[in-house]
Image (cartoon, helix red, strand yellow):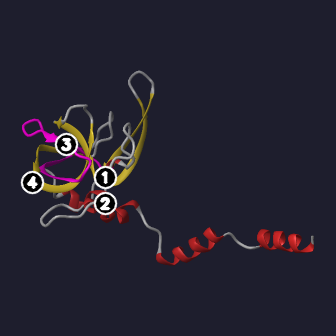
Amino acid sequence: MRKILAVLMFLCASPPAFALSQEEGSLHGTKTILDYIGDYVDVPPGALDWKVLGSTNEVQIQTKTDDGYDLIYQKPEFQSDVMALDGKEITIKGYMFPLDQTEDQRLFLFGPFPMSCPYQYHVGPALVLEVHAQDHPVAFSYDPVQLTGTLELVPEDKEYSVFYRLTDAKQVH
């Protein structure tokens, strides 16, 4: 009986293993979502790195609609290197988040991570492009695709909190 009691006391008094691993990991600093992009998508030569877009600050706006309802949305604070890309043609590689059930997508969301939920893309608006590919529809793929188009910065979108649009988009093969 004493042995069982001694083992139980030892288990209760010793720190859990996961706490030790967290302590060890804390020596390397805290990682952000931007640190994991490279695990999912590479940056092709001449293409834009998602980390540049991810440097945009997200400001939460709380206001009221004309009807008196609460309205909460995100508004961007673009960094100078992002502002310099407004209206420029860019190439970027990422994953599609379809907004339509068709094979060929003309309007979809695009980001550096594969979709994990069919209802919501689980990253902030600084890491999502709204892609307009009316003239060159892109066949849906679960694999990363490379796109080119004109980057449009959206200073305020009260309805969807979109920060970026990629217009005249087409897939690069």
Q: Residue at x 21, y 64 (%)?
A: 43
Residue hosting label 3? 131
Q: Nearer the viewer, residue 123 or 173?
A: 173
Q: Residue 138: percent from the left, percent from the top?
A: 14, 42
The residue singled out by tag 4 in the image is 173
The quarter in which the N terminus is drawn is bottom right
Q: Amino acid at mark 3?
A: Val
Image quarter (top left, top right, bottom left or bottom right) of the C terminus: bottom left
Name the residue at 47% across, 73% down. 29
Q: Amino acid at mark 1?
A: Leu
Give the structural element (helix, strand or loop) at label 3. Answer: strand
Residue 21: image x %, image y %? 57, 73
Q: At 18% from the left edge and 61% from the top edge, which residue is drawn? A: 48
Disc nearer the start of the sequence (4/3): 3
Q: Is residue 25 above or below residue 44?
A: below
Q: Which residue is the site of mark 2? A: 40
